[in-house]
Amino acid sequence: MARRTLFLSRNRFGHVPKSNLSSVERDRFLFRRRLGVAGVLVLMAFGGLFARFFYLQVVQHQHYQTLAETNRIAIVPIVPNRGVVTDRNGIVMAQSYSGYTLELTPSKIKNLDETIDALAQVVDVTPRDRKRFRKLLDESKNFESMPLRTRLSDEEVARFAVDRYRFPGVEIKARLFRQYPFAEIASHVIGYIGRINDKDVERIADWEDVANYKGSDYIGKVGIELSYERELHGTTGWEEVEVDANGRAVRTLSRTPPVPGNNLRLSLDIKLQQAAEAAFGDRRGGLVAIDPTSGDVLAFVSRPGYDPNLFVDGIDPASWQELNESPDKPLLNRPLRGAYPPGSTIKPFLALSALANGRRTPTQTIFDPGFFQIPGQAHRFRDDKPGGHGTVDMYKSIVVSCDTYYYMLASETDIDVTARFLGELGFGQKTGLDIEGELTGVLPSREWKRQRFSGKNYREEHRKWYLGDSISAGIGQGYNAFTPVQLAHAIAMVANDGVGYMPHLVKSVQDLKTNEVRLIAREPASRLDAKPEHLAVIKNALIGVNKEGTSAAAFRGAAYTSGGKTGTAQVYSLKGEKYTEHKVDERLRDHAWFIAYAPADKPKIAVAVLVENGGFGAQAAAPIARKVFDYYLLGDKSVGPAPVLQEHPGDDESD
Amino acid sequence: MLVFIARAWEALTRRIDRMLFGCAIAIVGVGIVTLFSAADQSVPRVTSQLLSFGFAITLMWLVANIPPQTLARAAVPLYVVGVLMLIGVAMFGIVVNGSRRWLNFGVARFQPSELMKIAVPLMLAWYFQKFEGRIGWIDYLLAAVLIVVPVYLIKRQPDLGTALLIAASGFYVLYLAGLSWKVIVGLAAVGAATGPMVWQHLHDYQRERILTFIDPTRDPLGAGYHSTQASIALGSGGVAGKGWLNGTQTHLDFLPERHTDFIFAVFGEEFGLIGNTLLLILYLLLIGRGLVITANASTLFARLIAGAITLMFFTYAFVNMGMVSGVLPVVGVPLPLVSYGGTAMVSLFIGLGVLMSVQAHRKLVTT
């Protein structure tokens, strides 16, 4: 049709004498002739294509048919060995080993259930294996091969090999497995790998790394396994093989070996980690221990943990449900993703802020009658000690954790000034810890409140900053919420005289190809704008806390001096009633905080401990810090039973 | 009531060229059917392609209703903005796959070279229309500059394939505007003579592609792999094809890029020579209709732009099928209306919309 029209247009004008045409018509004639030439070229080009198709699909059909059907060349990816993760002393925390799996390709199998039943006669197939396989089947495509059984024994492999002819579409494959020898210990640090899902595929596409994951079935999902995925994975190798019509390899033509993934050395000390986890007992909570002089994270505890080995082959539904629905939330990474009101642990930082901003001098005193009132208002902000602490200077305000001192300080200080200083200590922002998902917490300020309540359901009165907001925030309640990582980072910064390092779990990366070791530890990341004499005042008061203050009992008889501060974060507001621990349901009890560092003169370790629903910080959290310090500073042998606090903390030490 | 609906329908489709649209729909249909197989029967991918299609025909309808004179007014701004964005890409573009082709606008990434595919012929057609009747050699020289500037910027990204296609679109306008045969032959001769010099300036991957094209077995794992596997797919398809969803090359993962640039290999494997011939005929009908519309266009601008669009459509189809069947080197050109991808679908239907506008508005201007 197109062809005819084109020729028509040529014929119609081709024979008209040119001399009789106006210039417009002549132009048109020339244009149509050019169009005609183009049309002929189009026809020739398509004719050429047709000839090529004819050549490929008719003349050479047999040749290509053979190539496609009997003698296919397949490019088989060879998955690299995933990097090993060790603690700072070289103790292995995650490793790969190869094992045999029994894999089924559903598209090649007529009756899946019958085949699985028949296979169960040859090798062990548990109901759990079947369930897991069903789940994989739902998630993937028919052309993929999927493991029914993993970790076959040599005997099972031999038995299957004999019966192999009975099972088309079923294969034994050698695969790499991941194993976490310490199971629950440090599970929130290491994380786990799992089968690649649709979301991971998108992530890989974003990295422009699709080819490298051609043969990979697993990818880091959480923790170090996730954040250092690209270091750990390695470079996929290739094997060019001839395969027969069933896709089975007949002969290898060439081989490009894979490059194994890089090894990671953590800054974590696994023995210290074990001691810290043991110190928690059955209690829930988190602990972060940092070397203040480098930012090395020495221990990172989130209790309860989980066994990452469960996730590697795809977790079975029952175990998943148990983990996911447990009220103890074992999957929650508390130090990283738990934001809690800091309670009194914020006081030393607020005191430092007051010194830096000239609001207070160390010797300036206030009188504490046991409460604080905003002038002209009836409401009394109570101190924990009925009757008050009397005359209080800065040292005493920290040692006895005097609320009234901080109520007054907060009432005289602009919240934005405080927020700016606390921001320098890393509050309200990510510390940059090298695992994903860190929360920023909440560092309240005017702007924060305005944005938080910017929604349509709020009015101007909700967005405005009130003096009362400042006063609650002044003792670490109210809007404040920080993660244990943030508190550990802040106390480490104070311990190290205001010089902060970005906390990091991985100390170095070892490139297996070049044997080069790359250090993750960096230069100081931040420097606090505070005078040395001001820092000295605060550090002296923190030492006082562990010597004669709220946590003195926990540190009685320690072979080193240390600084610390207790804190209690309210979970449940009792609306004016007096808080009585045993009357309140266990889950509604206050969270216990403790931050500390040691030794006092030359700090080697700084720690933040949070015990959920632990009650008083001094009672629940401080003894855990003591055990960690004893272990780290004095070594294994001197770990004695930590002092157990029997008596209720005295009224004088009210936090 | 029925009358009303009939009238409304009439008004709505007045500017839609039945034959052009019919061919386009048939080709899109081929694309959807093939995509379903290429994507291992993934419904989301097909849905996404259908959504792009819906969006594309809406734009086509809009453009078809805009008279060509109005389109001409957009030529200069589009061209200027396009060139500015290309300069922007060179300065702050984001690098993907080693090429700097994208601009990041926060919400979306945009590839300005895509815009130039329509802006360059539009600009040239506008230029020749503006100076119609007094076109001299100086105008061809200026037009050449208008082509070379964006082509150079795109070649630098580096994206030689797109640069050549845009150069071609500009050349089509010059050719239809009456560029002397002597010059065309001369240019071809110069091109052939400077070939070795151009070779010096090519990037490694571009040389690799050309070498591989000459001998695909040279590097069967790397650059030649695409070509070899596509030929096997087509050849093993035979006369009748292996049947829908039954292509072994496709489903055993031998074919790379099988949703996008190499989708024709999937089609050829599953539908054979018969399918290929039908697809060729569909393209031929569409291109032929485009040429008829061009021949009947009333203004110089309309003629030039319609001709350029039609010939570009042909070029894409030819280059893609030629590449898949191994008669042209591997360049990243999708098969028009068939390959998976929203941007290409939208720009092609806009092109068809321009053709329809030219056809629908011709009587209004003809004396």
Image: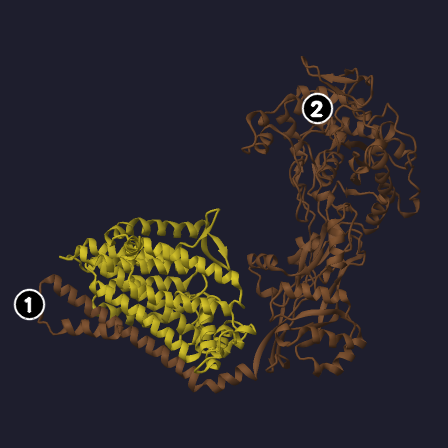
As drawn, the label of residue A20 is: 1
Q: Is A423 on the left-hand or right-hand side of A599?
A: left
Determine which quarter of the picture holds residue A51.
bottom left
**Residue type pointed to by label 1:** Asn
Give the chain ID for the yellow colour. Answer: B
Q: Residues within 10 Å of mark 1 (few under 14, many from 20)?
A: few
In the rendered image, residue A587, in percent from the top left (x then y), is placed at 79, 38
Dot 1: element: helix
**Residue type pointed to by label 2:** Leu
* 2 or 1: tag closer to the N-terminus: 1
Mark 2–mark 1 Cα distance, whole angstroms, equals 102 Å
Pick the front one: A137 or B311? A137
Determine which quarter of the picture holds residue A538.
top right
Q: Chain of mark 1?
A: A
**Do the numbered discs 2 and 1 sit on residues whose CB atoms are within 8 Å?**
no
Pointers 2 and 1 within a single chain: yes
Above or below: residue A245 compared with residue A548: below
Residue A450 visible (yes or no): yes
Q: Residues within 10 Å of mark 2 (few under 14, many from 20)?
A: many
Q: Which quarter shows the C terminus of chain B?
A: bottom left
Residue B262 visible (yes or no): no
Pick the front one: B253 or A324? A324
At horizontal 43% and vertical 67% (from top left) the residue drawn is: B31
Q: Can you tell which of label 2 and label 1 is closer to the viewer? A: 1
Above or below: residue B213 compared with residue A395: below
Chain A colour is brown
**Residue at the disc numbered 2:** A355
